[in-house]
Image (tube, rainbow, N blue to C red):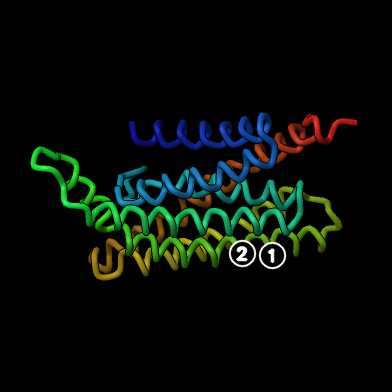
Amino acid sequence: MNEVLWISFAITDLCIALMLYRFFGRIGLFAVIVFNLLICNLQVIKTVELFGLTTTLGNILYAGVFLATDMLSEFYGKREAQKGVLLGFITLVLMTAYMQVALHFSPAADDFAQPHLEAIFGFLPRIAVASMLAYITSQMHDVWAFHFWKEKTNGRMLWLRNNASTLVSQLLDSTIFCLVAFYGIFPTPVLVEILATTVIFKAIVSVMDTPFIYLARRVHAALPENAH
Protein backbone atom coordinates (compact mmCIF):
# COMPACT_ATOMS: atom_id res chain seq x y z
CA MET A 1 0.00 0.00 0.00
CA ASN A 2 2.87 2.41 0.67
CA GLU A 3 3.99 2.32 -2.96
CA VAL A 4 0.47 2.86 -4.36
CA LEU A 5 -0.18 5.64 -1.86
CA TRP A 6 3.17 7.30 -2.65
CA ILE A 7 2.54 7.42 -6.42
CA SER A 8 -1.05 8.58 -5.94
CA PHE A 9 0.08 11.25 -3.47
CA ALA A 10 2.74 12.54 -5.89
CA ILE A 11 0.31 12.86 -8.80
CA THR A 12 -2.31 14.48 -6.58
CA ASP A 13 0.13 17.05 -5.21
CA LEU A 14 1.35 18.01 -8.68
CA CYS A 15 -2.25 18.32 -9.89
CA ILE A 16 -3.09 20.56 -6.92
CA ALA A 17 -0.14 22.81 -7.79
CA LEU A 18 -1.61 23.26 -11.29
CA MET A 19 -5.10 23.86 -9.91
CA LEU A 20 -3.88 26.54 -7.51
CA TYR A 21 -2.00 28.20 -10.37
CA ARG A 22 -5.09 28.04 -12.59
CA PHE A 23 -7.34 29.74 -10.03
CA PHE A 24 -4.91 32.07 -8.25
CA GLY A 25 -2.06 32.70 -10.69
CA ARG A 26 1.37 33.41 -9.24
CA ILE A 27 -0.17 33.83 -5.76
CA GLY A 28 -1.21 30.19 -6.00
CA LEU A 29 2.42 29.21 -6.65
CA PHE A 30 3.58 31.16 -3.60
CA ALA A 31 0.93 29.27 -1.61
CA VAL A 32 2.23 25.93 -2.94
CA ILE A 33 5.77 26.79 -1.83
CA VAL A 34 4.73 27.85 1.67
CA PHE A 35 2.21 25.05 2.28
CA ASN A 36 4.35 22.22 0.91
CA LEU A 37 7.44 23.44 2.72
CA LEU A 38 5.73 23.59 6.12
CA ILE A 39 3.99 20.23 5.81
CA CYS A 40 7.01 18.36 4.44
CA ASN A 41 9.08 19.53 7.41
CA LEU A 42 6.57 17.75 9.64
CA GLN A 43 6.28 14.66 7.46
CA VAL A 44 10.05 14.28 7.13
CA ILE A 45 10.24 13.13 10.76
CA LYS A 46 8.46 9.93 9.75
CA THR A 47 10.43 7.20 7.97
CA VAL A 48 8.68 4.70 5.71
CA GLU A 49 9.58 1.74 3.52
CA LEU A 50 9.05 2.09 -0.23
CA PHE A 51 10.01 -0.66 -2.66
CA GLY A 52 12.01 -2.32 0.11
CA LEU A 53 14.00 0.84 0.93
CA THR A 54 13.84 3.12 3.97
CA THR A 55 13.22 6.77 3.24
CA THR A 56 11.72 9.85 4.88
CA LEU A 57 8.21 10.99 4.15
CA GLY A 58 8.01 14.52 2.78
CA ASN A 59 9.97 13.89 -0.41
CA ILE A 60 6.85 14.32 -2.51
CA LEU A 61 5.84 17.68 -1.10
CA TYR A 62 9.37 19.04 -1.28
CA ALA A 63 9.53 18.11 -4.95
CA GLY A 64 6.32 20.12 -5.39
CA VAL A 65 8.20 23.17 -4.09
CA PHE A 66 10.71 22.79 -6.94
CA LEU A 67 7.88 22.55 -9.49
CA ALA A 68 6.34 25.78 -8.19
CA THR A 69 9.73 27.53 -8.21
CA ASP A 70 10.41 26.42 -11.79
CA MET A 71 6.97 27.63 -12.86
CA LEU A 72 7.68 31.04 -11.32
CA SER A 73 11.04 31.10 -13.09
CA GLU A 74 9.55 30.12 -16.44
CA PHE A 75 6.53 32.41 -16.45
CA TYR A 76 7.51 35.38 -14.27
CA GLY A 77 11.30 35.48 -14.21
CA LYS A 78 14.16 35.02 -11.78
CA ARG A 79 13.12 37.80 -9.40
CA GLU A 80 9.67 36.33 -8.75
CA ALA A 81 11.16 32.86 -8.24
CA GLN A 82 13.64 34.23 -5.70
CA LYS A 83 10.77 36.03 -3.98
CA GLY A 84 8.96 32.71 -3.64
CA VAL A 85 12.09 31.07 -2.22
CA LEU A 86 12.53 33.81 0.39
CA LEU A 87 8.84 33.71 1.32
CA GLY A 88 9.12 29.98 2.04
CA PHE A 89 12.31 30.52 4.03
CA ILE A 90 10.82 33.26 6.21
CA THR A 91 7.66 31.22 6.82
CA LEU A 92 9.70 28.22 7.99
CA VAL A 93 11.72 30.41 10.37
CA LEU A 94 8.54 31.92 11.83
CA MET A 95 6.81 28.55 12.26
CA THR A 96 9.83 27.17 14.11
CA ALA A 97 10.08 30.20 16.39
CA TYR A 98 6.35 30.33 17.14
CA MET A 99 6.13 26.63 18.01
CA GLN A 100 9.12 26.91 20.35
CA VAL A 101 7.32 29.72 22.16
CA ALA A 102 4.15 27.59 22.32
CA LEU A 103 6.08 24.74 23.98
CA HIS A 104 7.20 27.07 26.79
CA PHE A 105 3.63 27.78 27.90
CA SER A 106 2.75 25.71 30.97
CA PRO A 107 -0.06 23.31 29.99
CA ALA A 108 -3.30 23.08 31.95
CA ALA A 109 -3.77 20.14 34.30
CA ASP A 110 -6.11 18.35 31.89
CA ASP A 111 -4.11 19.18 28.75
CA PHE A 112 -3.21 16.18 26.59
CA ALA A 113 -1.45 17.89 23.68
CA GLN A 114 1.82 19.04 25.28
CA PRO A 115 3.73 15.70 25.15
CA HIS A 116 2.64 15.16 21.55
CA LEU A 117 3.67 18.67 20.55
CA GLU A 118 7.00 18.20 22.31
CA ALA A 119 7.57 14.91 20.49
CA ILE A 120 7.03 16.62 17.14
CA PHE A 121 8.22 20.19 17.59
CA GLY A 122 10.85 19.51 20.23
CA PHE A 123 12.81 17.80 17.47
CA LEU A 124 11.85 20.48 14.97
CA PRO A 125 14.67 23.02 15.61
CA ARG A 126 17.31 20.62 14.27
CA ILE A 127 15.02 19.62 11.40
CA ALA A 128 14.28 23.28 10.71
CA VAL A 129 17.96 24.31 10.71
CA ALA A 130 18.77 21.44 8.37
CA SER A 131 15.82 22.28 6.18
CA MET A 132 16.61 25.99 6.07
CA LEU A 133 20.24 25.40 5.08
CA ALA A 134 19.27 22.80 2.49
CA TYR A 135 16.30 24.80 1.23
CA ILE A 136 17.98 28.17 0.70
CA THR A 137 21.06 26.57 -0.92
CA SER A 138 19.21 24.21 -3.24
CA GLN A 139 16.44 26.63 -4.21
CA MET A 140 18.79 29.49 -5.04
CA HIS A 141 20.82 27.04 -7.11
CA ASP A 142 17.64 25.83 -8.80
CA VAL A 143 16.64 29.35 -9.84
CA TRP A 144 20.15 30.12 -11.09
CA ALA A 145 20.50 26.82 -12.98
CA PHE A 146 17.03 27.10 -14.54
CA HIS A 147 17.88 30.45 -16.09
CA PHE A 148 21.40 29.30 -16.98
CA TRP A 149 20.00 26.46 -19.09
CA LYS A 150 17.24 28.69 -20.46
CA GLU A 151 19.86 31.10 -21.79
CA LYS A 152 22.06 28.27 -23.12
CA THR A 153 19.15 26.78 -25.08
CA ASN A 154 17.68 30.13 -26.18
CA GLY A 155 14.44 29.37 -24.37
CA ARG A 156 13.95 25.97 -26.00
CA MET A 157 13.86 22.51 -24.39
CA LEU A 158 11.81 23.30 -21.30
CA TRP A 159 12.22 19.66 -20.20
CA LEU A 160 16.00 20.09 -20.07
CA ARG A 161 16.12 23.17 -17.86
CA ASN A 162 13.35 21.79 -15.66
CA ASN A 163 15.19 18.52 -14.99
CA ALA A 164 18.81 19.73 -15.18
CA SER A 165 18.20 22.42 -12.58
CA THR A 166 15.97 20.37 -10.30
CA LEU A 167 17.95 17.11 -10.21
CA VAL A 168 21.21 18.77 -9.17
CA SER A 169 19.37 21.00 -6.70
CA GLN A 170 17.63 17.97 -5.19
CA LEU A 171 21.02 16.30 -4.71
CA LEU A 172 22.31 19.38 -2.89
CA ASP A 173 19.17 19.58 -0.78
CA SER A 174 19.16 15.92 0.23
CA THR A 175 22.86 15.82 1.11
CA ILE A 176 22.78 18.96 3.27
CA PHE A 177 19.49 18.05 4.95
CA CYS A 178 20.29 14.44 5.81
CA LEU A 179 23.75 15.20 7.21
CA VAL A 180 22.59 18.11 9.37
CA ALA A 181 19.26 16.59 10.48
CA PHE A 182 20.12 12.95 11.05
CA TYR A 183 23.89 12.65 11.66
CA GLY A 184 24.34 11.01 15.06
CA ILE A 185 20.66 10.09 15.31
CA PHE A 186 20.64 7.14 12.95
CA PRO A 187 23.44 4.57 12.56
CA THR A 188 25.70 5.38 9.62
CA PRO A 189 24.37 2.58 7.36
CA VAL A 190 20.80 3.79 7.95
CA LEU A 191 21.83 7.42 7.34
CA VAL A 192 23.49 6.46 4.05
CA GLU A 193 20.39 4.51 3.02
CA ILE A 194 18.09 7.40 3.90
CA LEU A 195 20.29 9.82 1.93
CA ALA A 196 20.45 7.53 -1.11
CA THR A 197 16.75 6.76 -1.13
CA THR A 198 15.83 10.41 -0.56
CA VAL A 199 17.84 11.37 -3.63
CA ILE A 200 16.28 8.55 -5.66
CA PHE A 201 12.68 9.25 -4.70
CA LYS A 202 13.02 13.00 -5.11
CA ALA A 203 14.56 12.41 -8.55
CA ILE A 204 11.61 10.21 -9.52
CA VAL A 205 9.09 12.88 -8.52
CA SER A 206 11.19 15.53 -10.28
CA VAL A 207 11.01 13.58 -13.53
CA MET A 208 7.30 13.00 -12.96
CA ASP A 209 6.69 16.74 -12.82
CA THR A 210 7.98 17.28 -16.40
CA PRO A 211 4.58 16.81 -18.12
CA PHE A 212 3.03 19.02 -15.45
CA ILE A 213 5.24 22.00 -16.30
CA TYR A 214 4.19 21.59 -19.95
CA LEU A 215 0.56 21.54 -18.81
CA ALA A 216 1.34 24.63 -16.73
CA ARG A 217 2.41 26.41 -19.92
CA ARG A 218 -1.12 25.89 -21.29
CA VAL A 219 -2.63 27.01 -18.02
CA HIS A 220 -0.44 30.12 -18.11
CA ALA A 221 -1.65 31.02 -21.60
CA ALA A 222 -5.28 30.65 -20.47
CA LEU A 223 -5.00 32.91 -17.42
CA PRO A 224 -7.00 36.17 -17.73
CA GLU A 225 -3.87 38.25 -17.12
CA ASN A 226 -2.25 36.66 -20.19
CA ALA A 227 -5.30 36.46 -22.45
CA HIS A 228 -5.09 38.49 -25.65
In this figure, which residue is indicated by the disc labeled 1?
Answer: 144
Q: Is residue 137 left or right of residue 104?
A: right
Location of the C terminus (image quadrant): top right
Q: Which residue is drawn at 49% across and 44% down?
A: 36
Q: Indicate whether 61 appears above or below 221.
A: below
Name the quadrant of the N terminus.
Answer: top left
> Relative to residue 171, is residue 194 drawn left or right?
left
State the separation of the CA atoms marked 1 and 2: 6 Å
Residue at x 32% of width, y 53% of height: 99
Badge 1 vs badge 2, beta-carbon distance below 8 Å: yes
In which quadrant of the rendered view does residue 176 lie? Answer: bottom left
Q: Position of residue 30 (x, y in %)?
A: 60, 45
Q: Quadrant of residue 79?
A: bottom right
Name the residue beneath numbered marker 2.
140
Residue 225, x across and y down, in percent: 81, 35
Say which amino acid is labelled 2.
Answer: Met
Locate residue 65, reporting x and y percent.
Answer: 55, 48
Residue 199 percent across, percent down from the top left: 46, 57
Q: What element carries label 2?
A: helix
Residue 97, labelled with which disc? none
